Image (cartoon, grey):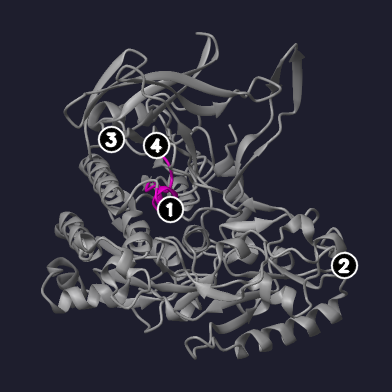
Amino acid sequence: MITRRSFATSLAAGTSGLTLSCSGEPKNAPTPRRVVVLGLDGLDPKIVQALMDQGRAPNFKKLASTGTFRKLGTTMPALSPVAWSTFITGTDPGSHTIADFVMRDPITYQPYFSIWETRPPDRTLSIGNYELGMGGPGVVNKRVGVPFWTYLTDAGIPTTVIKIPTNFPVDDTATRAVSGMGTPDVADSLGRFNYYTTDVSEEYPGIAGGLVHQVELRGGRVEAQLAGPGNFIRKDRAELRIPFSVDVDPTNDTVLLEVQGKRILLQQGEYSDWVQVRFDVASWLLGISGICRFYLKQAHPHLKLYVTPINIDPAEQAMPVTFPAEAGHEIASEIGPFWTKGLPSDTRALDSRVIEDEGYVKQAELILKDRLRLFEHEWERFREGLFFFYVSSTDQDAHMLWRNMDKTHPMHGASDVRFSGYIHHLYEEMDKLLGRVLPAADDDTLIVVCSDHGFAPFSRQFHLNSWLREEGYLALKAEAASKESASLEDIDWSKTAAYGIGFNGLYMNRVGREGQGTLGDAEADRISRRIASELEAIVDSDTGERPVHRVYHRNEVYSGEFTREMPELLVGYTPGYRSSSDSVMGESGAKILDLNPWAWAGDHSMAHELVPGCLFCSHPLRGDNPQIADLPVTILSFFGIPKPYDMQGVSLL
């Protein structure tokens, strides 16, 4: 049978030298060599170096002294889905198409999530209020290109790829895989929490990422409903819900939860174990299984109960999160349920103050333990070939707890200082993780530790679309001209030359590409050069700093057939600055620069040369300026497989 893997490889292999004999067996016989890669998202070289100097990272220090330690050049923008897609394919966004977390449909200008999409079925069958999809692709990964491990798999070399970003839904390209960043929960692509409170004064206007439920305590009991996914076989996609109850102890800070026959006793400040829940789609015939944790924020005087996003149950997968599918049940049977949501930490719940620093850190600790259990399970089974294992904690926890350790950050005063050392503690845990694999290093086993980018403070936000609006590059409709806060729907595209979508992207409104384009190619190029110059000249009057370190033209950093669809300009911010969340979604307002008000206080969507990642290797590497695109070529080279023609990097061996 022709699989997606074999078909894609045959198209892309070209002059890679991976040819088949007449018998159909690969000429490249499996080698006894092994490659072990720890992908530690956001691991910052400055922090690692400081901990090595202090004697707090002995395994990193040992690997650096016996092998190689370098800063690792990253993509522009220095965003995880962009950089890891380059690691996976050996190409840049002009080829693999993932240029940001958020991109836009050029015809409608509407933003979309870049990693995957749900495509409609080939045909539907309508029966009353129900609509059944018949065939079709369903959920599709939007990343283009051949994962480097495909060449290994096709050469008969086993490949284990655990939690790598932009690999949802998983497929047969690896021997064994668990999906990572980009994996949704059962209800929402980015994850949606539920929060229940009896405090009527507790309000969260404009909250994103969750549902807040005002509930009543009657006779010591709260009756509530757990909101889940939409019913995908109903035309109205009515939300599925599960009833549950909470009995509050009248004297102690304790509650008893009951949901679908399961009883959970919780103390204040405690997370429950995983709770499996099932949403009935069509009575008992069809259902969606999920797993969640309950966190009792407060029992008295008001009940305040937080529920994590409902993760896809790995044992009964609503969407494919493991390959082969039965691996999910096998892993869950051995280590218990585990976070399947691609970015497990609920950063939006902390940003909205539904949970506080303490609640976030307790969740972060559970996530890390969960991930390390998964590592131990997979490491014990690994014998040969490629072993890739990814940790998200080093990225997500740095985003949310940077302000706790950084006394210069404007949000430091509002932070819980008990967690000022948490990021350094997390790096020490990564050192211990490295200690588990380091003994395997030998002439035939390559140990690699890499990160997709580093980190920097995010203190002030730049409202890119507000600046474009003020400078006349972005125009509003007449009826919206007086609006302080304007959305994409308020833009007059017939008078707009440029707009921002995503964390770093700035698009020209081109004729022939955009749905209502106004600029020809020559004019678009002229205006883009002027905008770049003007952005780089801006000075923040409150700090005296330039918020924009450098603006890159796409042709400087991208190549490939999709380059024309990419943003013309990529705004590289100065550390301390980042695009505002409003601008990411194409919105504009009165302010151009102001303080970052969020708990999310560390970031990396700056000029990419200012936030390099880390590269540790057990073997000597050549060159002083390794790039993330070099890593897939290097790994293939170690196994004796020549560089595929479409990869852009070089072997560092």
- Tell me the CA gap for discs 1 and 3: 68 Å
Q: Earlier in the sequence, mark 3 or mark 2?
A: 3
- Secondary structure mostly seen in the magenta stretch: loop
- Tell me the CA gap for discs 2 and 4: 53 Å
Residue type of the residue flagged with mark 2: Val
Rendered location of residue 303, percent (x, y): 32, 32
Q: Which mark is residue 511?
A: 2
Q: Which residue is mark 4?
A: 199
Residue type of the residue flagged with mark 3: Pro
- Tell me the CA gap for discs 3 and 4: 9 Å
Residue type of the residue flagged with mark 1: Asn
Q: Earlier in the sequence, mark 3 or mark 4?
A: 4
Q: Which residue is mark 3?
A: 301
Mark 3 vs mark 2, foreground winner is 3
Q: Which residue is mark 1?
A: 28
> Which residue is nearer to you in this view: 34 or 463?
463
Residue type of the residue flagged with mark 4: Asp
Q: Is residue 48 above or below residue 256?
A: below
Q: Is residue 524 above or below residue 392?
A: below
Q: Which residues are magenta?
A: 340-353
Q: Please give left or right for residue 214 compared with residue 295 in the image.
A: right
Q: Is residue 440 visible?
A: yes
